Structures are given as C-alpha cells and as structure tokens.
Image (tube, rainbow, N blue to C red):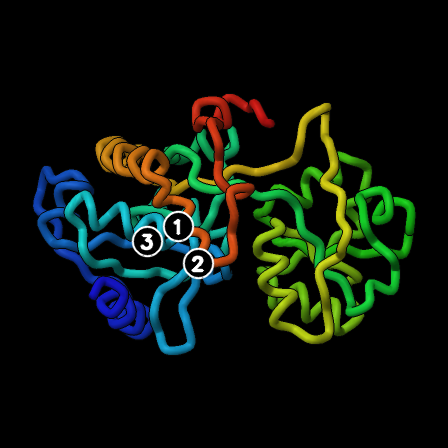
C-alpha cells in the first residue's frame, strides 16, 4: 500500500538523510516516474501534513498530493520534515520536489516557486488559554488590550496582516509552530497563538490547557477578506510536473473526490477553493 511505503521511507529519511540517483537531462517528473519516488517537504503540522505516531504520513494536503502523484505514475514518497521558514529555500535548493504543507499562494511566494491550482481554503484561528480569560474574539480585542502578546510562526502571513491591521509588532512572539505557541501560552510568554483556523482547531483539541477562541470574526484588510488559499508548491524548473499535477487536481474537483479526501480530516465544502485561481492569487488579488 502507498501509505505503508511512505511510512518506511519517512523513518529512513529522518535517520539517514536523502539519497537519490538522477539521469542527466531528466526532468523531475521523468525521474519520479522512472523511480516511482517523489520527495515531499512539510513542517509536520496537522491537519495539513504530519507523521502519525506509528510513522505513517497523513494530512489533508499530503493526501491530496499523494492521490495525484499516484495517478501520474509516482507510487512512493520520501517525506522531508523541515521548519516552516525552510520550506521554500529547501525547495529552491532541490532538497525535495514539492511542498505539501498547506502553503498559501501569495505573490511573494509566487516570485520564488510555482504553485498548483488552489486545493484548500481557510480563515484565521486563534488559540487562547482555556476559558478565554481575556475574552478575545476579534482583532480589535487583540489591539485594544495593550498587554496581549500574540505568538505566531515568523514565516506565516497571519501575523503580518495582523500588524498591518494595527497590532504592534513589538507584542509579537515568534515561534516555530503550534506546539511552541501553545507552550508559550502555558508558560505565560504569550496570550494567544495565531495561525489558520484548521491548524488551530486541530491543535487546541489536543491540549487541555488551551482552546480555540470562539466565536471569532475574521478581519477585513484593505476591503478584502484575509481568507487564504493553499496549493502544492514546485521548483520553477518543474513546470511539467506542476502541469501534470494540475490536470489530475482538476479531475478531483470535477468528480467531488477532493471533498471526500479532505472530509477525513473534518474539513467541509467551506474549505474547498471554489473558483479561485492561482493566477489571481499570484497577481495579488484576494477574496
């Protein structure tokens, strides 16, 4: 089974590193089809892409990607776990072939890598101490309480938009990811952790000392929703791989299989990308 093969390779990569043989002149797509192996990078965050306790690779983004890779003739994967901030630099250095981490399609990123068409859509989420003692339900609540400190990954767009909305950057606490953000809350170094709503809901459900801030109102920035659209990222040299991927992704959308894949992780029709395109998102347009 595909999942079993991925499980075994994940262990090998974490212990021994990545070893591969490339024929001169081959594209990444050609090599992957010949060897049956694709290298995928992610930062180990549920429900996007993560390694389960028994070693299997799972997550909404990675399941979408692996379904598509199988259909274009690539049956196995090498999973490479790196910090969020290292994903694009590692892809550009060809340490892996695709980013399957639920990465938002943004103009700045489009300047460095190429993206598939959108696969998922999410809003903002906020993790707070259990009981939400500071009664945080909106960006205004964060801004108006001068004592509130917000943790967030430095490579994320949520905190940048939060600062643009008027939250002082001096009150940001930068952390690698959700576990570190929750640890900062529990240690009193931060009062909230900001990321996308899917990650926050998943992580809050696993830690009894925190909860998802509800109700929560997504802000509007420059007259537009801050809702994000994620896709799979590829090296700029790998247009043929991206095009083959998009062809199968289109079929998943048309048949309804995309919703079936993400529903396993509690996602709904609200998390589908609709008719949003990568061309729009790379051009700086938003919902």
**In the image, is 206 to the left or to the right of 267?**
right
State the residue at coordinates (38%, 41%): 233
Mark sitting earlier along the chain (3/1): 3
Q: Which residue is mark 3?
A: 40
Up the image or down, 15 lies above or below 93; here it is: below
Quarter holding the N terminus?
bottom left
Q: To which residue does mark 1 refer?
A: 260
Q: CA distance from mark 2 to mark 3?
A: 21 Å
Q: Are marks 2 and 1 in contact (CB under 8 Å)?
A: yes
Q: Secondary structure at mark 3?
A: strand
Q: Residue furthest front?
A: 255
- Circle 1 packing at 10 Å, graded few (<14), some (14-19), many (20+), is some
262 to 106, vertically: above or below: below
Q: Mark 2 — residue?
A: 264
Helix, strand or loop at label 2? It is loop
Question: What's the distance in space between the residues labelled 2 and 1, CA to CA?
Answer: 7 Å
């Amino acid at each position: 089974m595909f999942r079993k093969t991925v499980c075994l390779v994940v262990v090998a990569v974490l212990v021994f590193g990545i070893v591969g043989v490339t024929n001169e002149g081959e594209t990444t797509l050609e090599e992957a089809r010949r060897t049956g192996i694709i290298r995928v990078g992610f930062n180990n965050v549920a429900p996007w892409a993560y390694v389960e306790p028994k070693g299997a690779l799972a997550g909404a983004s990675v399941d979408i990607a692996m379904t598509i890779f199988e259909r274009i003739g690539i049956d196995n994967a090498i999973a490479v776990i790196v910090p969020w901030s290292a994903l694009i630099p590692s892809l550009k250095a060809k340490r892996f072939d695709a980013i399957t981490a639920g990465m938002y399609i943004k103009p700045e990123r489009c300047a460095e890598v190429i993206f598939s068409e959108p696969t998922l859509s999410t809003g903002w989420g906020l993790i707070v101490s259990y009981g939400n003692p500071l009664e945080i339900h909106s960006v205004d609540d964060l801004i108006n309480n001068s004592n509130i400190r917000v943790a967030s990954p430095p490579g994320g767009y949520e905190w940048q938009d939060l600062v643009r909305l008027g939250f002082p950057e001096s009150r940001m606490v930068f952390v690698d990811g959700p576990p570190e953000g929750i640890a900062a809350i529990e240690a009193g170094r931060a009062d909230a952790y900001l990321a996308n709503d899917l990650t926050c809901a998943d992580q809050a459900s696993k830690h009894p000392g925190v909860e998802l801030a509800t109700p929560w109102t997504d802000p509007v920035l420059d007259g537009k929703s801050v809702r994000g659209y994620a896709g799979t990222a590829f090296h700029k040299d790998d247009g043929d791989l991206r095009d083959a991927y998009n062809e199968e992704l289109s079929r998943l959308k048309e048949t309804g299989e995309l919703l079936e894949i993400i529903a396993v992780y509690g996602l709904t029709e609200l998390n589908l990308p609709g008719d949003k395109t990568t061309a729009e998102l790379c051009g700086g347009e938003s919902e």
